[in-house]
Every structure is written in structure tokens, then in C-alpha cells.
Amino acid sequence: MKRIFLICLTFAFGLGILEILGRNGAWNTELFPLPSEILSFLGRTLTDGHAHAGKATGEKNPSPILYAVESVTDSTLLAAITVTLKRLAFGYFIGFALGIPLGLITARFRFMRETLGLVALGMQGLPSVCWVPLALIWFGASESAILFVVVMGTLWSLMLATEHGVRTVPPLYSRAARTMGSKGLHLWTRVLIPASLPSVISGMKQGWAFAWRSLMAAEIYVTILSGYGLGWLLHNGRETLDMAQVIGVMLVIVAIGLLADRIIFAPAENWLRARWGLDKA
């Protein structure tokens, strides 16, 4: 608890310094809003009705632009987070379901490494936003277009991480297992895949990060009526020059990424370290 308190105190101190400097004219607050303005935006958009509370009470909004934006939209932060997380989870699951088997096949067969592996290596370096025009042509402005971009951003990194993990398993493990009679599917499920799990977990984290970037690119450029996500809020803030909204949404994206790491990936990594006796005694 003391450590958490010190961390929170450090962040609060830093935000306080920024607030004081901004209010004393250290920078243009229209371009980089005060921390209080960002927190005010997040607070008003967490639940329905909070965005318009200023109108009924006469409370002054941080900026006229933010007041205008809140007057014409009923979108809330929680609703946007829900829409975005649904798209992210679905696209990431499809990328995972395709990437892991393809990675295993690529690691197993040299011909696949020289063909499909080469394609995956090139596709991984392709920015996710490059898939947006193709998705719009193929699927139109729809959920399928967004899903396609997320899958393309996730698939290749997971595939390459799986291939790398299997191929970097020490050959001694395979030889020892074969000496004891292990072969075929038993060798893969009992030796190679478990030994490659650290690389696979790292690939899953990287795939999650690529999925986030792909989804934000898709939501910014593909506007659909089935649900406005965080990317749309980010784009909306940019179009209306509302820096409090832009930075507020960015902070939410960072917070969700940190929570995902702490809740999903960190426990898996800790379990692996404990399972293999890598933790300090």
C-alpha cells in the first residue's frame, strides 16, 4: 500500500506542477489543455447525462469548442469503451486462432517458412492504416471492414512469434524426447509447444498492441452507425480542435492497455516463471 501511495503521490505532484505552469501561461492551453480540463472531460463523459450537466446548471465548460461538441452528441465514454473492446476482443480472437496454427505450420515445414513466412515478415512491417482503403473497398463502411483491419494487424505478429518460439527451442529437448520415444503429435504437444510458450506469450502481447493500433486506425477512418468507439471520439476531438477530448481519449487507451497487461499477460508470464522455477527464492 505504501508503494502504491507513493506512486499516486508522484503522479499527482507531476500533474499539479503541469496545472500551475499551464495556468501561469507556460504554454498555449488551447493546444495542450490543463490536466484539470482533461479530467473534467473524462468525468462528464463517464456516464450518460454528465456531458450536458453544464447546460442545466450554468457551469462553465473548459472551452467553447468542448461545449459545442457536447451539445450535438450523446456519445459517452463508457459506451465508446464498450464498443471498442468488443471489436478488439473479436478481432484479436480471430487473429489468435489463425496466427498460432499458421506459426506452428511455418516452423514445421521449410517450404512454408520460405513462402508464407516471408509474406508474414513483409506484412508485419506494413502499417495497419494501409489496410483501411482495401477494407472499405471490399466490405464498405461496416463492422466487417473494422474487423478485417484488426485481424490483419494481429495475425502476422502472432504467427511470427509462434514460429520463432518453436524454432528457438534447444535441439537437446527434441533429441532427449525422441530418445525416450516421443514423436509426432506427442512431441509437439508435450515438448515443443510448452517450451516455446515464453515467445508465444510475448507474441500475444505484441499482437495485442498491434490490434490496438489497427483498431484505432480503423475507427478513425471508418465511421459506421452501429457504434462509435474510442477512435471516433479521438477523430471527433481532432476535427473540433478539442485537445481535452483528444488527450483524454489517449489516456483512456493507455489505461486500458496497462490493465490488459496486468490482468491478462502479466499473470500468464508470472505463472510460466513460477512453473519453470525462474523466480527468485
Image (cartoon, grey):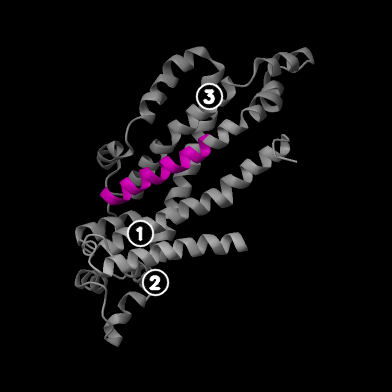
Residue at x-position 28% and y-position 66%: 22
Q: Position of residue 26 (x, y in %)?
A: 24, 63
Quadrant position of residue 169: top right
State the residue position of label 1: 249
Asked if one can make out residue 19 in the rendered structure from this viewpoint, the answer is: yes
User: Does 77 appear in magenta?
Assistant: no
- Callout 2: helix, strand or loop? helix
Q: Nearer the viewer, residue 194 or 29?
A: 29
- Mark 1 crowd level (few <14, some 14–19, many ≥20, 10 Å Cα): many
| Mark 2 and mark 3: Cα distance apart in space | 45 Å
- Callout 3: helix, strand or loop? helix
Q: Which corner quadrant holds the N terminus?
A: bottom right
Q: Position of residue 124 (x, y in %)?
A: 39, 30
Q: Residue 153, which numbered label?
A: none
On screen, residue 109 versus residue 281, left or right, reads left
Circle nearer the N terminus (2, 1):
2
Magenta part of the protein: which range?
Answer: 203-222
Quadrant position of residue 183: top right
User: Does 212 appear in magenta?
Assistant: yes
Magenta segment, prevailing SS (helix, strand or loop): helix
| Mark 3 and mark 1: Cα distance apart in space | 35 Å
| Mark 2 and mark 1: Cα distance apart in space | 12 Å
- Mark 2 crowd level (few <14, some 14–19, many ≥20, 10 Å Cα): some
- Specify the amino acid type for callout 1: Val
Circle nearer the N terminus (3, 1):
3
